[in-house]
Amino acid sequence: MNRGMMLKLENLVQLHCACRQLHSLSYRKIHRTQWKPVKSSTYPMRPIQLHPQLWQTDTFISVVLSQYRLLATKEGKRPGKQKLPPIKPKIERQEVEIQQRMTVEDLARAMDKDIDHVFEALLLTGIDLDSLEPDSVLEEVWIKEVVKKSGMKYKWAKLKQEKVRENKDAARRPPADPALLTPRPPVVTILGHVDHGKTTLLDSLRKTQVAAMEAGGITQHIGAFLGHAAFSAMRARGTHITDIVILVVAAEDGVMKQTVESIQHAKNAKVPIILAINKCDKPEADPERVKKELLAHDVVCEEYGGDVQAVHMSALKGENLMALAEATVALAEVLELKADSTGLVEGTIIESRTDQGRGPVTTAIIQRGTLRKGCILVAGKSWAKVRLMFDENGKTVDEATPSMPVEIVGWKEIPSAGAEILEIESEQRAREVVDWRNYAEQQEKIKQDMEVIEAKQKEHKDAYRKERESLANLTWRQRKAALYKTNKHLIAMRSKERAESDRNVLPVIVKGDVDGSTEAILNILDSYKANDECELDVIHFGVGDISENDINLAETFQGIIYGFSVNANKSIQQLAAKKGIKIKLHNIIYHLIEDLKDELSSKLPPSVVEHVIGEASVLATFCVTVGKSKVPVAGCRVQKGQLDRKMKFKLIRNRDVVWKGFLTSLKNHKDDVQVIKTGMDCGLSLDKNIEFNIGDEIICYEEKEVEQTISWDPGF
């Protein structure tokens, strides 16, 4: 074979190899940069022309290959030794496990990349990179975006299936057999408006009850007297333990706002009412007016054909207390109140507090069973082994029967007012119940948080999808402009959020002597609506004296501590003074609320009030030449007060304010003057060359800053 033939064969073989490479690449879909032409180390490649129908046939390819093998054998080379470019296998995309609420650091770790890679992938996505930290939580849409931009694919990580815990909660017993029920005394609640004598009546009835127990009086047949605050706490939790409501109305004031609320509370709880018309010893007392006013609220006394007993009395002087007690006992007999005093104890907590010597103490009403020392109780997320029991007069008792109020000592934590008391077989069982309730509360909170997160994610996902759809048909230049507008919008939104974070807020901490007092104060605070005024933020509340933790918390939020019937020892007061924290202690609720109103008012910016100094009317108008311009001048007469050039002025035309500002000149005849008094004529011009009309009014005034007061009406 001559040299020319060898060159042709070599070129044909190289061409064939190139064709095979292209054929393979088209099927394997390998990136074009992986293909390289085969270069001969022996002979340079020369261009040749072949007819396509010839070199595309299998016969031609086989002939060429056979000739090539023969040629290679003669030169001592094997065709298998020919180095062809390797065909790389198909590259599998890396799979990344993602999950909800991944941080930047978590995502980088899952992708096996550094944190900077995640930041680079988030460029031009609308997310604020300046506010992004390694521990910042990313939304689902951004997590997916980073993975896609990194040439990877994602899959959701399998959530660890937590083992479903068995319900270990405790519950009330089934209703008792009617044959086991025995008569019980009534539980009485005293409701009414502030300062109508509820507390005085409550104290008087309790003292009368003590004397009656010693002497066999009528009030020994009444189980417990509860106050307004305790009733509100029970009602807030849907707990109804009251049998009879005594509605206290002052004879000289009549029906007030909280009187109406008390009537509504009693009706909602479906509890019968006894009317106690208090302060009847005062000269201005008018009991009949009270009864007539109550008709409008569907409280009809027996004198008017209704079923509500009315007692005229004076709690302060103790007048007619026995008549009120007899009316209560008579109504209780009609109600035929009964309870089961056997078996496990059931009851309700009225108040909770911390006693320095005895720890957590609760006042409770027993509703079923008989409570004795050593009983194991659960209430809310706390449990107790009863160590001591006291009646409401502080005397030690060995047992408590239905309708009896009792103080219980032995609680591990302070349960809330209104919590249900259940007796449990053992301490181990009590711990199981408390543990289950903590777990159930935690699961409920997680569920609520996830609902909020999912709603927020859906909102962002929808917004992101709409944004992408709007950019789909745009050119790169239009898309860049649109992204610029989006970023401007995000910056504006963040500015708005920062402005909201600087809003006017008064943080407060509320501490009470007992749980019921704290509840009553918080219920009043709930009625406060900020609107555009100062916001009220209760950052913490609790029971007991002011502590160092309260001071530290108040320092963190720059708040005020309010205490009701609690103490702050000398070291606590010194610490508060050192840190600049206010401690406000009160023994009367409405004094505390008034103090709080003053603090809220002090947070409001002062309002500007216009104080009129003088008034003048325009009698004539003309123009004067000053330099090259003409200046309008008004000829005026002062009708009231005086015009002072240093003060502000306003021009009123047809009762509308046309202009506000300062005078450029004030003259009497041809003289410049500072003040023009009542009855004098003057000429004046304004700072903006305003045209005057005859009949216009000129008002001279000064602006004064006046402290604003909060518009909150708590009902006192």
Image (cartoon, rainbow, N blue to C red):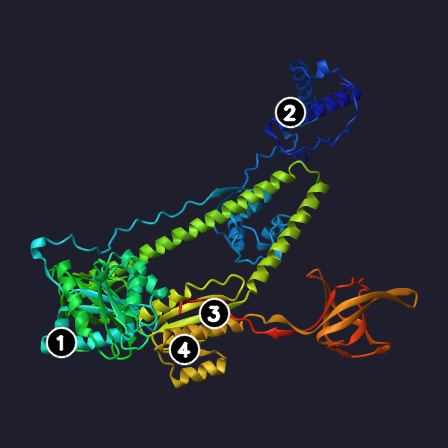
Q: How crowded is mark 4: few (under 14 residues within 10 Å), some or many (20 or more)?
A: some
Q: Which residue is drawn at 40% across and 76% down?
A: 591
Residue bearing the label numbered 4: 548
Q: CB under 8 Å between callouts 3 and 1?
A: no
| Element carrying mark 2 | helix
Where is residue 386 drawn, in percent x and y? 18, 70
Residue bearing the label numbered 2: 23
Q: Which residue is drawn at 63% across and 55% down?
A: 492
Mark 1 or 2: the one toward you? 1
Q: How crowded is mark 3: few (under 14 residues within 10 Å), some or many (20 or more)?
A: some
Mark 2 or 3: the one toward you? 3
Q: CB under 8 Å between callouts 1 and 2?
A: no
Apparent side of residue 514 relative to residue 149 in the rendered image (left or right): left
CA separation, marks 3 and 4? 17 Å
| Element carrying mark 4 | helix
- N-term mark: 2 or 4: 2
Residue bearing the label numbered 1: 212
CA separation, marks 2 and 3? 76 Å
Where is residue 224 drawn, in percent x and y? 20, 69
**Relative to the observer, which residue lies in front, 44 or 107?**
107
Where is residue 383 drawn, in percent x and y? 24, 65
CA separation, marks 4 and 1? 45 Å
| Element carrying mark 3 | strand
- N-term mark: 1 or 2: 2
Mark 3 or 4: the one toward you? 3
Q: Is residue 565 above or below residue 105?
A: below
Mark 4 or 1: the one toward you? 1
Where is residue 328 drawn, in percent x and y? 18, 66
Quadrant placement of the N terminus: top right
CA separation, marks 3 and 1? 48 Å
